[in-house]
Image: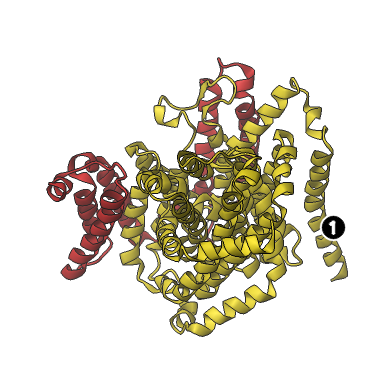
Chain colours: A red, B yellow
Amino acid sequence: MQKESKAPLGADLVIPALALGFAIYFFFSTADLIWEAKANGVIIGTALVILIAFQVGRIALRVMKGEGDLGFAPLWQPREVVWKRVGLVVTTAAFIAAMPWLGLTLALWLGMLAQLWLIGVRRWKLLFWIPTVTAAAVYLLFIAVLDAGFPHGPIEMLLTR
Amino acid sequence: MTWQFLLDQFAAQFALWWVIWLGILLGIVVGILPGFSPQNTLIMLLPLTLAVPVEQALAFMIALYCANHLAGGVPAILMRIPGSGGAAATTLDGYPMARKGQAQQAIVLSFTASVFGGLITTLATIALLPWLSKLGLYLRSVEMVIIMLFGLTLIAVIAAKDTLKGLIAGFFGLLLGVVGTDHVYSEPRATMGFLELYDGVPLVPALIGLFAVSEALVMIEEKMIVEDDARERAMRASWADTVEGLVITAQKWWHIVWTAFVGLFIGIVPGAGASIAAFVAYQQSRMWSKTPELYGTGIPEGVIAPESANNGVTSGTLVPMMALGVPGGSTAAVMMIVLQYHGMVMGPRLFTTNPELAYGVFVSMAVAYIFMIFTILPLARYMARIVLIETTYLVPIIILVTAVAAFVERQYLFDMGLALIFGIIGYIAHKTNYHVTAMLIGIILGPLFEQYLVRALRLSEGNLMVLFSSPLANVLWGFLVLSLVLPLVRGRMRVNRS
């Protein structure tokens, strides 16, 4: 007999959990403030907590009825792109962290090269030209034309010398 | 003001065609990039606008401002990445149209609704300027509280499929909107010790994270943005699709007109902006529609309403600046600085002392819109091709370039990190059907709603009845109740009939 698949309802609790955590933090961090300063947040936060309670109750009922389980499958499906997705987040964080040292242009070039390779581009011409054209366009618009205050690195220093 | 005077003004503005084109081109580029607001660009270009004659500076600034509002809808339609807060509502129907292989029609609709919406309201402003300038005086914090409620009810509309999830997302956004110092005592609230959050959750990183980064993380699951069964249609796109977009525009002309006026009236109120106008127009459009259930599935009205309204705002924002000397928004404030530097004094006397400038601003806007339609409409066919580029190449560009754009407004690396965090939240929300637009509405409108409500309550010493204290407020309450009840009644009648 084929096993009946249950809805993975645990994933539906992640956003409520984040919201609840933030609401609790809001209540504690504003406890000492004057009522007018926190009134809006307290009213919204209380409504949010009530809504979350309803959602938790709804999910608990469905789990008890056997319609679902507390799985998180929707968050990492399809399986084959999970590591690509994680890699994109990690390389973006690395790009942000490296920008003060490498400067916008070089950090962007390296970040883009890493992300393209990570999600499956293997043709070396594309791996070279997409980051180069993007980094050059970003440099021209944000640094050369608009002087938007990005961190300068070796490439910016070389070009402004 | 005579016809001859107006014709002379139009002739003078047409003579500045090259300045207007420069403004339009730059406005389109920065409008497409999330994070680049027109006021940022104008501040960066202050050395230029202060150095050239005032007529040229004005024509350039106005063209850039209007083009920026227009272009924000392009990435919203093609990649579900609004170029600005004013284009966030465009994603609701624009992106589904692109996924169905109708990207070109959606872009044409966005352009024509923007241009004609902007043009109609600009011409109306020229004709009615003395009266419109007084309207701003009647719309006070009490009336603004109700106008904000019009926008906030969109959360409930979005939540229609799963009310509880929609409301949780909306209230989570509203709570995030409370972060930062309060409006009376400047007490920091829930800033987690970050000085960067004292001004509240910055809109641009939230927008980029919730829409661009999260969408890119989902996008890698598919080969292209366009759905598999619609790919054939998207590949066969031709000039006929542009014509089809124009025909739809002509059929929906009344929709463009009334939603543009929603934008104009909201724009006149100092502090209100394109995002509020777009959300309110979308909500109203859906509420009064005979087929509200089709909104969100990719229908032309869902693109027309927000785009027409957010361009209707452009002329409205300048009304209080010209007539009262009060800038209607941050872009208007930058323009005012430039005009004052050139010796122009804003306010009621401007219309008698310098009518060429007072009316010239709006004539310049009308001319910019006329130029814009000829400049940008032919590009729709080529822009629509983006949905056919493989996501393997698009995803890194979207994530990293929008992360760069998150930095631009306030120049904090913190904002780039915040965009990434919002991206992860947005991804989880996408995957579990908590609507990110509901969250964004909360983040955008929450602080404004609080600001106007606190101001109204302070003025009335805490008496809630102040919200029902003016005839205009009561009329707006009536409209709000009507727009909420009417669709329910019509829905019930339809069920009974069937």
Q: What is the quadrant of the N terminus of chain B in the image?
A: bottom right
Q: What is the quadrant of the C terminus of chain B in the image?
A: bottom right
Residue B415 in sight here: yes
Q: Is residue B237 left or right of residue B10?
A: left
Q: Is residue A102 left or right of residue B474?
A: left
Q: Is residue B389 left or right of residue B495?
A: left
Q: Please name the amino acid that badge 1 sits on.
A: Val
Residue A73 in sight here: no
* Location of residue B91 by image quarter: bottom right
Q: Secondary structure at mark 1?
A: helix
* Location of residue B272 by image quarter: top right
Mark 1 — residue?
Answer: B489
Where does the image place residue B267, in percent across and percent down from the top left? 63, 48
Where does the image place residue B182, in percent across and percent down from the top left? 56, 25
Where does the image place residue B30, in percent across and percent down from the top left? 41, 55
Question: Badge 1 local density, few (<14 within 10 Å), some, or many (20+)?
Answer: few
Residue lying at 49% horizontally and 78% vertically, measured from the top left: B230
